[in-house]
């Protein structure tokens, strides 16, 4: 029974050593690649600032395009009603008598 306790203690100590060595290696490589990380972050920032006006213009164009599509989506189903109203208006205008001018 004591052997199992000793084995568990050794395994736990081995995992602790592996974790500490891995953490130190991670810290060393993180510090080693820090300048490259900073350069990449700066490059992303510059590209983002340069592309921001393009994205804004394309966004406005897309918004106008989607607005036109939505407007057509509403007006196309109403087209028969609009045509019928125009026909009724034209018939009423054609068959109504013009107003007579009177002198006072």
Image (spheres, rainbow, N blue to C red):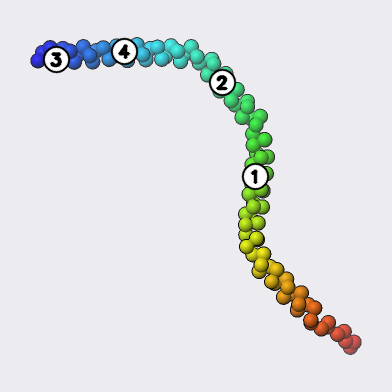
How far apart marks 3 and 4 lie (CA) works out to: 21 Å
Element at label 1: helix
Residue pictured at 79% horizontal, 81% vertical: 95
Nearest the eye: 30 or 66: 66
Residue pictured at 54% horizontal, 15% vertical: 35
The image shows residue 80 at horizontal and vertical percentages of 66, 67
> CB of mark 2 within 8 Å of CB of mark 1?
no
How far apart marks 3 and 2 lie (CA) works out to: 51 Å
Q: Residues within 10 Å of mark 1 (few under 14, many from 20)?
A: few
Residue pictured at 60% horizontal, 26% vertical: 45
Residue 7 placement: quadrant: top left
Disc on the earlier residue, 1 or 3: 3
Q: Residue furthest bottom?
A: 104
Can you identify the residue that label 2 sits on? 40
Disc 2 versus disc 1: nearer the observer: 1
Can you identify the residue that label 1 sits on? 62
Can you identify the residue that label 4 sits on? 18
The image shows residue 74 at horizontal and vertical percentages of 62, 59
How far apart marks 2 and 1 lie (CA) works out to: 30 Å
The image shows residue 33 at horizontal and vertical percentages of 50, 14
Disc 3 versus disc 2: nearer the observer: 3
């Amino acid at each position: 029974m004591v052997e199992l306790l000793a084995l568990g203690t050794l395994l736990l100590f081995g995992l602790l050593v592996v974790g500490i060595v891995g953490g130190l290696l991670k810290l060393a490589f993180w510090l080693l690649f820090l300048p490259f990380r900073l350069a990449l972050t700066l490059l992303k920032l510059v590209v983002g600032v340069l592309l921001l006006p393009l994205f804004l213009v394309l966004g406005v164009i897309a918004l106008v395009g989607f607005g036109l599509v939505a407007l057509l989506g509403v007006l196309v189903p109403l087209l028969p009603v609009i045509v019928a109203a125009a026909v009724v208006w034209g018939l009423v205008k054609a068959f109504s008598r013009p107003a007579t001018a009177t002198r006072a």
